[in-house]
Image (cartoon, grey):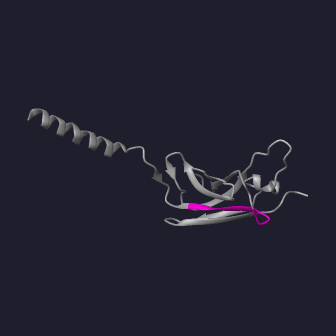
Amino acid sequence: MKRHVTLLALSLVSALVLNAVGCGGTQSAGATASGTVTVSGQPLTRGLVQLVPKGGGPSSFGTIQEDGSFQVATTAGVSGIEPGEYGAYIDYAVEDGESLPFHRKYTSEVDSGLTYTIQEDQDNVLAIELEGPDK
């Protein structure tokens, strides 16, 4: 009987500790955001969408997939994005022999002209349309 009580007590303590500490699950940042990036109507096939809050705080990003789609995350362990106003730019690595497939202004938060409002408790869908490369 004593062994049964000890095992029960250990189980309860373990459950309380895991509940207090957490199981390493993902926290939500308050809103979700996803979207597509196109250049002159065609999907951008790689890169990162970087979202920088206008009032300060953690930046968010989305990896651009081959179809131009992306899903926004804040950091490891935090899904989604904090509500608020954001400036955006595209982080794109040019490979050997390749030129930037869109206007270079979109690689700078200051020059891109891309701004978005993220609403709380919503799935915010961003359609990012970029102009073609510099002439």
Which residues make up the magenta segment? 33-42
Residue 135 vs residue 107: left or right?
Answer: right
Q: In what quadrant of the picture does the C terminus appear? A: bottom right
Task: Estimate the x, y position of residue 93 in percent, counting from the top left.
Answer: 76, 45
Q: Residue furthest front?
A: 66
Q: What secondary structure do most residues of the magenta stretch adopt?
A: strand
Q: Does the magenta run of residues contain 101? A: no
Residue 106 vs residue 1: left or right?
Answer: right
Residue 47 vs residue 12: left or right?
Answer: right
Task: Estimate the x, y position of residue 1 in percent, counting from the top left.
Answer: 8, 35
Task: Estimate the x, y position of residue 52 in percent, counting from the top left.
Answer: 64, 54
Residue appearing at x 69%, y 55% in the figure: 66
Displayed quadrant of residue 88: bottom right
Residue 68 position (above or below residue 22): below
Residue 10 position (above or below residue 63): above
Residue 92 position (above or below residue 121): above
